[in-house]
Amino acid sequence: MQPIPLRTWIALIAVNIVVSALTTLIIMRVAGSSRPTPALQPAPAPAAVQALLPSLPTAIARPTPASPPTQVSKSPASPQNSVRIVAVNGVGQRQREQVVIANEGDLTDIKEWSLSSSRTISYTFKNVALLKDTFVNVYTTSGSDTASNVFWNRDEPAWQVGDTVVLQNGKGVVIDTYVIK
């Protein structure tokens, strides 16, 4: 078997780059067609924000719930609340249960924030920061935390139909609620 010439490798890499770029543009066009895209205005991050970035994991993807959300009623979002509960999926199924928390505002450190229910169960976020337009999935099951997925490591399901899921900041201020029906 002969080695592949350098020119062939370069051509293959160039084709791969072009196909990847076109695929990304098509996906962005399709995904973004349902809502207007705000103009991006790059600005340098304040020194305090830059100091936080190296020490905190950050979520970088957009919410993509695995199954249809079970939400029926939702608390009204206030303009100050940029972090909200988007969906609760797989209710009652420990291996599939997932709460999706999204940030539609600026960088938000949610360390010490909590998710709780009307049945007095509670999950407290460790080192998690959400960049603008990102999310974090909170899974009931066991696993290793990543930037966009955190695991509660519970032995049984956390959520039931009828629960009110409450997201509170570290000072106990209610940020958002979500009723599961």
Image (cartoon, rainbow, N blue to C red):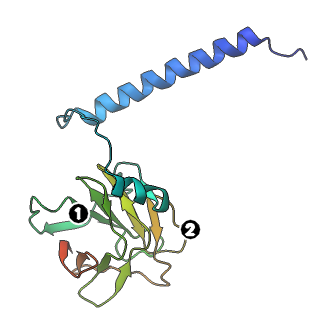
47 to the left or right of 17: left
Tell me if 34 is positioned left or right of 93 in this view.
Answer: left
Which residue corresponds to mark 1? 84
Residue drawn 30% across the image and 55% down it: 107
Kindly identify which numbered label has been placed on residue 92: none
> Is the residue marked by circle 2 packed among few (<14), some (14-19), or many (20+) residues within 10 Å?
few
Above/below status of 47 relative to 75: above
Residue 5 is left or right of residue 119, and the answer is right
The image position of residue 164, as x and y in percent, is 21, 79
Which numbered disc flags the more N-terminal residue, 2 or 1? 1
Q: Quadrant of residue 112?
A: bottom left
Please name whichever residue, 58 or 134, is drawn nearer the observer in this view of the structure: 58
Task: Look at the numbered disc 2 and give the secondary structure of its residue.
Answer: loop
Discs 2, 1 touching: Cβ within 8 Å = no
Secondary structure of residue under mark 1: strand
For the C terminus, which image quadrant? Answer: bottom left
Q: Nearer the viewer, residue 180 or 131?
A: 131
Q: Amino acid at mark 2?
A: Ser
Q: Taking 167 as reference, is 39 above or below it?
A: above
Residue at the far top: name it. 7
Q: Residue at x 32, y 47 (%)?
A: 45
If the image is split into quadrants, where does the N terminus sit? top right
The label on residue 144 is 2
Kindly identify the amino acid type of the residue bearing the numbered disc 1: Arg
The span from disc 2 to disc 1 (Cα, nearest Å) is: 23 Å
At which x and y percent is residue 2? Answer: 89, 14
